[in-house]
Image (tube, grey):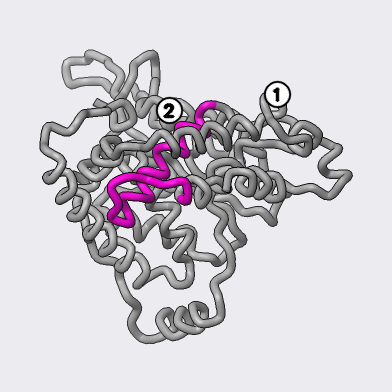
Amino acid sequence: MSIRNEVRPSAQGPDATVAEVDQVGTRLAEVKRRVGDVIFGQREVIDETLITLLAGGHALLIGVPGLAKTRLVETLGTVLGLSAKRVQFTPDLMPADILGSEVLEEADSGRRSFRFIQGPVFCQLLMADEINRASPRTQSALLQSMQEREVSVGGTRHSLPHPFHVLATQNPLEQEGTYPLPEAQLDRFLLQVDVTYPDLDAERQMLHATTGATEAKPAEAMTADQFEAAQRLVRRIPVGEKVVEAILKLVRNGRPETSDYDQVRKHVAWGPGPRASQALMLAARARALMDGRLSPSTDDVLALAAPVLRHRMALNFSARADGVTLDNVIALLCEKLR
């Protein structure tokens, strides 16, 4: 059964659940430490990416070149014990280059048959590097994989490994020769993680660590089975009614049709759909588990509002004319929630 559909009530008592949360929280702290040994000055990026994976989702990492986006994905694959593959998206990339294809084979007896050769999507952690450089046709090849955890080739469905996650990178600077991701695909990403420049101390540490004779290598901190168990635990973490109401208020006020705020009705072309509510619920649970807490709080919702909403909303011409940004709108929604 897929992780995204598995909601299994705990068969253990509350004390056992508390012990499991403590154990998983300790193990995740070790994961963060080992990732931090290789990736410098990106604590928030590491946290948001781990939250995405724990919640069973996919992440879109956006940042200028040279900020260790590719290295982060490779490191996570090693530390979490997941099989990872990388696909460099280019304008000439075809869907079969990602999904795989059927080839015609002839046996010694002369009988011919088709055999399916798996593409790089058959892994547990797929890095889609510069995803917006591929054509819309190739981009759409990932839609079924990201939503259904399976691919269809030649009329036959092929299940993907469990767990399965896509970590896609996008360069915001080089716009020539790119194809913006459609809203349907953007909505499949649980979080949009903005990768920024490291601070001075982190960049100094990075210089010493990466330009010497030896360089630190990531080490495994969890197995794939342990990570799947942590994902199941996220689904079992209870959420208080106050947090549920905060999620609903935040998301629904981001839609012009149901918002209580004039600025949203004036400046937002379209707002977040129900997947945003689901993403906030799961991500808040995952954030609480990473901190070793038994349930999420409203602070978790506020901390995750921007990465959940920023790729699920669009501004209209009036907002651009008034100099209003999405960050301004999300900040307003969060301020009204405090």
Residue sitting at x 69%, y 56%: 173
- Name the spot of residue 283 as percent of width and height, x first: 42, 43
In the image, is residue 4 above or below residue 58?
A: above
Q: Badge 2, how many Cα within 10 Å: few under 14, some, many 20+?
A: some
Residue 287 among magenta residues:
yes
Q: Is residue 125 visible?
A: no
Amino acid type at circle 2 is Gln
Report x, y in % for residue 116: 31, 25
Report the predominant secondary structure element of the magenta stretch.
helix
At 47% from the left and 39% from the top, the residue drawn is: 280
Residue 113, can we see it? yes
Sort mark 1 into few (<14), some (14-19) or many (20+) by Cα contacts within 10 Å: some
| Label of residue 113 in the image | none
Q: Residue at x 41, y 44 (%)?
A: 284
How many marks on residues?
A: 2
The residue where tag 2 is placed is 147
Residue toward you, 275 or 115: 275
Residue position for label 1: 257
Image depth: mark 1 or mark 2 in front: 1
**Residue type, label 1:** Glu
Residue 336 vs residue 26, the one in the foreground: 336
Asked which quadrant contains residue 22, the reply is: bottom left
Q: Which residues are magenta?
A: 274-299
Residue 154: x and y in percent read: 39, 17
Residue 106 appears left or right of 132: left
* Sequence-first tag of 1 and 2: 2
Relative side of 218 to 138, left or right: left
